[in-house]
Amino acid sequence: LMYSVSGCKAKCATRKRALASAIRVNPADVHFTQDAGFSTFSDKRWLAQTMYEIVRKKIEPRDLPLLRVCRTLNGRLWSLDNRRLYVLRVCGVRSILVEPAGDASAYAEF
């Protein structure tokens, strides 16, 4: 799998730390931090290809890296990974684990 975390000790350790603090949410409850996005991920993989693979069950949403989110004072969650959030929403995913990335006031997007 493109997003497999096996084989790399550093990547596995990072994922374990993220999973330890992860919370389960509905992607529809997470807000985008940008109005527009790109059609590819940073590794040049097309968003549409990832959506196709999720819909066809070639990969599971849990195979993707965790979404990093910030919570504002009013309790809203904001994504730091907008492309991944877009893919999950379009595919109709209803429940995901997200990694809290700290207080939203620390990020310029807010």
Image: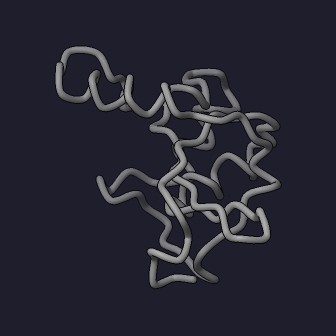
Pick the residue in front: 92 or 45: 92
Count of numbered circles on the image: 0
Residue drawn at x 43%, y 61% is: 40
In this image, 110 relative to 95: left or right? left
Quadrant including the N terminus: top left
Percent x, y of residue 37: 53, 75
Residue drawn at x 64%, y 83% is: 35
Image height of 99 relative to 97, above or below: below
- Which image quarter: residue 6? top left
Percent x, y of residue 30: 73, 58
Going by the picture, which residue comes out furthest to the top? 7
Image height of 16 relative to 37, above or below: above
In this image, 71 relative to 25: left or right? left
In this image, 93 relative to 71: left or right? right
Image height of 33 relative to 19, above or below: below
Image height of 38 relative to 80, above or below: below
Pick the residue in front: 13 or 2: 13
Percent x, y of residue 31: 72, 66
Quadrant including the C terminus: bottom right
- Which image quarter: residue 46? bottom left
In this image, 14 relative to 98: left or right? left
Residue drawn at x 60%, y 75% is: 33
Q: How is the image coloured?
A: one colour
Percent x, y of residue 34: 58, 79
Residue drawn at x 68%, y 46% is: 88
Going by the picture, which residue comes out furthest to the front? 73
- Which image quarter: residue 3? top left
